[in-house]
Amino acid sequence: MKRDYETGIDTNTIFLEVTVGTPATATTIVFLTLPGLDPEVIAESGNSNGNIPETPIGKAGKIRNGFLRIETTVDLGTLPESTWPAATEKLVVTYVLNGGTSGRDEFTFDPDDRKISNNGKIIAIGKPIKLT
Amino acid sequence: MIMKRRTILTFLAAFLLVPFLNAQDASTKEIKLEDLQVPNSPAFILLDVAPTAIEKPATAKAFTTSILNSVAENNGIPQNYGLEFTPFWFIKHPNFNAFKYYGIHYEAKGKSTRRVFAGLRMAGVSFALVNNKESKDSMLVKTSNLSLGLRSTILKVISNQDLRDIVRNNDSLIARLGKATRDRGKIDAKLDIVKDSLSVVNKRIDTETDTSKLRALIAEKRKLVKRSIILAAESDDLLNNTSVDTSIIRFENTIKEILARKPLFAVDGAVALNWAFDNSNFKSNYFDRFGAWLTMDLSLPLSKKNAAEKKNYINLYVVGRYLSGRSLDETDSLVRQDVLDSGGKIELEIARFSLSGEYLYRLNMTNSAQNSFRASAMVKFKIMESLYITGAYGKNFGDKNNVIAQVGINWGFGSGLEYVVAGKK
């Protein structure tokens, strides 16, 4: 489900933080799509298992009207298969946006943000956020 | 040719040794090193009677459903019911990650360290409700048993090599997943824009009165819907391709293989207790049994080569079991005892050959006349996977007929804690 975040129109910096809670292997990539442009990668979790510490994603006036897409992939393949249903059910992804006129906004993913591969091993969590 | 010769030798050995094995079946009921190992389900072991149905719910929902179903089926408290679960999987862990699961504190540039107590999180709980009939003072008494057990790896120390291998393979796995996420995310980001445009067009359609403009908007909507379907299908395909990507599967399997390797040192423990209720009367409840188990396992590889190829080890096992309460000995179910069984085994494992010494001591705190020990030396040769020739010599429990001299074949399990069934002379 799409979420809106009010950035404001000034030079204030907007920050994003992503925390993934799972015993499985995870990775997160953040895309910013500005009007009329292609999506651009602005943050990656690297080896931090899906976590992105508080990171500046741009000045409010510049990224306003853009779209954030926070894409997380969780790979359950390193866990015993018997634990996949529980690991899927108890997966937590927490997003925190800060610095805009909306202030500090903390939320998790919605059911329709989650997709699971046919064999149940890979979970994709995609959170779209419209910056208004 | 070599395989054929081995097979012939194996069957020949089995044929020659069958009489010895049959003779050993008559051996008296005695504790063995494996009996003292930390059990997976201490609640069931303590009861000595397995429940007829054992539920192993994988999720919190399944756990609730299992209990509700049992209550519904039995019109109340179930009569013979067992439950095993790991509470870790029933709770959300917002700050947990793969390295915590592996038992590693991750630091960049090769500075990662071990989390030796990480196994405690995966503690398993077992619970059993079992009814049985027992003879007490020449009366047949219906006893309801309620047993609760807890089992965990208390401490686990993996080798530096294993630590490095896990970190390296996890980094490689993340790199592959990162690429897949990037490819899929790019498409999903485009899909977000299309969906947003679609919602704008839908709003305009709802308010537009001009027919030609409305027609153009509907055409635009069709185009956007078509585009969104294509992008969504592309994204789904990429997700499914990631799940069967062979390079990803290779890294996953390597990590699982490393996690399954023998740790350098591990301590496992379990406790269980049991209450009994005679004739389904709550007032008649009494503490029946208590048990505690502890297993320590030190495994030092003798080779400094690649850890996956290590085959030579010095192993040291130390096991202990404390049992208190009504005796598990069925000959007299009213006798209460406090018994501490402890023992150990030191083993030199060189490729197919192993030499070990084993010692077991029973300390009966209720009746010291029953204190006794057993000590033996054992040689083992692995003919093929899960098939061994074994020989043992030593002293068995008790003061009479206590010489152990035995040759046998052991197959089926190769856990490293194989034991020799005592053959008395």
Image: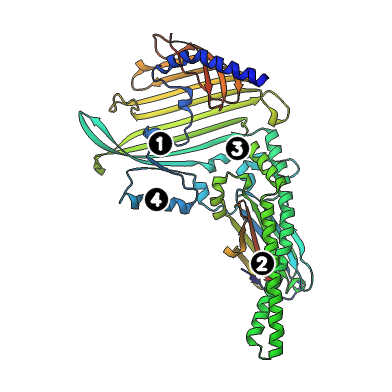
Residues flagged by tags 4 and 1 on a common chain? yes
Q: Which mark is residue A128?
A: 2
Residues flagged by tags 2 and 4 on a common chain? no
Give the CA separation, mark 1 to mark 3: 28 Å
Q: Earlier in the sequence, mark 1 or mark 3?
A: 1
Q: Nearer the viewer, residue B153 or B396?
A: B396
Q: Position of residue A59 (x, y in %)?
A: 76, 69
Q: Secondary structure at mark 2?
A: strand
Q: Earlier in the sequence, mark 4 or mark 1?
A: 1
Q: Which mark is residue B116?
A: 3
Report the residue marked by disc 1: B44
Q: Which chain's residue wears label 2?
A: A
Mark 1 is on which residue type?
Phe
**Colouring of the image:** rainbow
Mark 3 is on which residue type?
Val
- The structure residue drawn at horizontal position 66% and vertical position 23%, both measured from the top left corner, is B312
Q: Position of residue A19 (x, y in %)?
A: 64, 56
Q: Secondary structure at mark 4?
A: helix
**Image-quadrant location for residue B397:** top left
Q: Which mark is residue B119?
A: none
Residues flagged by tags 2 and 1 on a common chain? no
Give the CA separation, mark 4 to mark 1: 18 Å
